Image (spheres, helix red, strand yellow):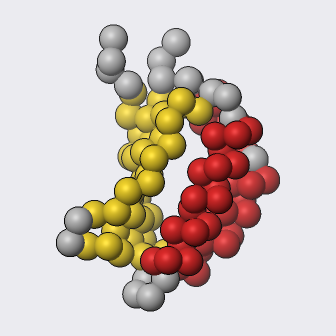
Amino acid sequence: MVAVVLHVEITLKAGTRERFLARAQEHRKNVLEREPQCQRFDISSEEGNPETIRLYEVYDNEAAVEQHMRTGYMASYREDTGPFVEDRKITRAVLQNG
């Protein structure tokens, strides 16, 4: 089994940080409560650049990531936060913890 890591870097539009973070925290809660194959879901902001947000998500395998992407609450999160996002970059990785 290979754990899949998603690094999501989000650049927010000016003045949207608090609204975005509130909605992202709600999404995080949904994922952790409803997706047992999500091992970790962290939200951080860059020091000195609070408009840059990073999500760090770890899933048991590729099937878990695919299921996550198909959920209704994922679609709602993307729709709700879309107006706040200037840019979004997703990098996929494989966990190498042994």
Residue pushed farthest right?
Answer: 72
Figure quadrant of the C terminus:
top left
Kindly tell me whether residue 42 is visible in this rendering: yes
In the image, taking residue 90 as reference, residue 23 lies left or right, namely right
| Count of numbered badges drawn on the protein | 0
Q: Quadrant of residue 75?
A: bottom right
Taking the spot 38% from the left edge, 34% from the top edge, the residue there is: 93
Q: How far across and down, in percent of the image, does residue 29 sit?
A: 64, 49
**Vertical comparison of 60 with 72: above or below:** above
**Vertical comparison of 32 with 47: above or below:** above
Residue pushed farthest left?
Answer: 48
Q: How far across and down, in percent of the image, does residue 32 sit?
A: 64, 40
Residue pushed farthest bottom?
Answer: 15
Kindly tell me whether residue 69 is visible in this rendering: no
In the image, taking residue 31 as reference, residue 47 lies left or right, namely left
- 33, 53: nearer the viewer: 33
Q: Quadrant of residue 38?
A: top right
Q: How far across and down, in percent of the image, does residue 74 sit?
A: 69, 54
Q: How far across and down, in percent of the image, does residue 36 sit?
A: 67, 28
**Vertical comparison of 52 with 18: above or below:** above
**Vertical comparison of 64 with 89: above or below:** above
Taking the spot 38% from the left edge, 25% from the top edge, the residue there is: 95
Taking the spot 45% from the left edge, 47% from the top edge, the residue there is: 42
Taking the spot 56% from the left edge, 24% from the top edge, the residue there is: 61
